Image (cartoon, rainbow, N blue to C red):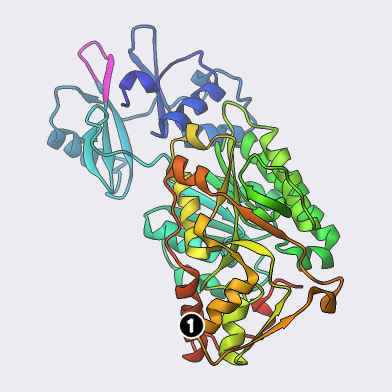
Amino acid sequence: MKKIEDILVYENTSIKEAMRIICDKGLGIVIVVDEINRLKGIVTDGDIRRAIMEGIDVNSEVSLIMTKDYLSARDEMSFDEIINMIRNNPKHFPDHYVLKIPLLSDENKVVDIFIKSANHGFRLLKERNISLKPVEKVLIVGGVGYLGSVLCRKLLNKGYTVKVLDLLMFKDEAVLEIKNNPNFELIHGDMRDITTLTRALNGVDVVILLAAIVGDPASQNQPISTIETNYFATMTLAQACKYHQINRFIFASTCSVYGLGDDILDETAELNPVSLYARSKIESEKAILSIVDENFSPTILRMGTLYGLSPRMRFDLVVNTFAMKAATEKKITVFGGDQWRPLLNVEDAAEAFVKCIEAPIKEVKGQVFNVGSDDQNYQIKHLAEMIKEILPETVVEKLKQEIVKGKVDKRDYKVSFAKINQTLGFKAKKSVKDSILEIYQAIINKQIMDVNNPKHYNNW
């Protein structure tokens, strides 16, 4: 239970410690008091990040940046009296503005906080019947892609403010319908450019890194860009978040890091990458986790192979490919087929990021989670059989791996997803069968008309 004492700090408290408390308690504010709890000033997470941008050392005392121009109210005032005070204030805080006002005793001691929230009305801290979100503004690096365009919509629907930094390699059509949303901001730029990156980080509470050279073929075709983007730029972004005191950082990794394995693999299993893409993700995971401290709490999400409809549709993913081929050619080709893959619908993948954002920070700090469903570990041949069952007119052609020697995907692994289910309560809701039908119908009904357009493929 949150108590007023949880967010009280002294004037000689360091800025870094104040930010740790802000992130840990999820209120976006600390109250600066003297030795007998008399109010001296207020510090918000925004105050701290602006100070960092101005070059102030985070080890400096919080008194250096605290705000003395604040609203306060007397403890005996009614809610109506406080609301009238807000509305009569020369600054006039609009209805959508989240405001936290210290309540003071006759001796000017801080006894509680009055919280005005656009979503939750008015309340006191001690009336903890409604929790404030510890995160309000999310930056998604790579938010116009296959997963990112789904995640943007999910976060906006939940009331978050969303900022996206994207290179727009496939233009911006995946976010056109949300570009005019007042809670959405799109920055066209490269995460490898430090000036652009710094601008994108301004004012955000959590950073989600999706941007990468994705998939084995793309990484094989662009090894230098893969190393630059998937490792060096990732490390730069993580360090920048740490410097700017952005506590929550979520990194999109992949179950491909397991490569080959006979057992069902959990997060403690040996990593056995068989591609540059997987190796780059492993090195990034190590680098990110190496800089965890009291104010930097990254989380690694190792996702299964994605499938399903998205505003930025991809047809170079196995389920999506099979569904597309069944719709356009009435034929699918299976190379080998005995390989195991953990599968994950893109909507469920987006929900996993939301679960991570909304979890208490102690549950996700420095953690690695496999993201998927135990009952969606499939052999490729099982997917072909499913296609045939759902769409009987489809011809299934099976070829031996040797026919595509040098090009066959060597990955073969099954994954356990018990940890994310037990820790975050995550459970995949979408099924492969239903998603195959959704994709098939979207193509047949001309909702997706240009299935061969290069924009639907990451095999650059």
Above or below, comparing residue 316 to residue 238 in the picture = below
Q: Is residue 164 visible?
A: yes
Q: Is residue 375 above or below residue 434?
A: above
- In the image, residue 380 lies at what x, y percent? 64, 70
Say few, some or many: other residues with alpha carbon within 10 Å of mark 1 (under 14 / 14 to 19 / 20 or more).
some
Can you see residue 204?
A: no
Residue at 52% x, 70% y is 175
Q: Residue 316 versus residue 131: which sits nearer the camera?
A: 316
Occupied quadrant, residue 334: bottom right
Q: Which residues are magenta?
A: 104-112
Could you tell whether 225 is left or right of 65 in the image?
right
Q: Is residue 292 magenta?
A: no
> Which residue is at the front of the view, 343 or 81?
343
Please give the name of the residue rendered at 53% of the width and 22% of the height, measured from the top-left corner. 17
> Residue 286 at x, y = what percent?
72, 39
Q: Quadrant of residue 183?
A: bottom left
Q: Which residue is mark 1?
A: 390
What residue sits 66% from the left and 78% below the top? 455
Q: Position of residue 271 (x, y in %)?
A: 73, 46
Picture residue at 37% right of the left edge, 55% below the top: 158
Residue extending furthest toward the top: 35
| Label 1 residue SS | helix
Horizontally, is 98 left or right of 409 in the view?
left
- Where residue 195 appears, x then y in whole percent? 69, 49
**Left or right of 31 on screen, residue 271:** right
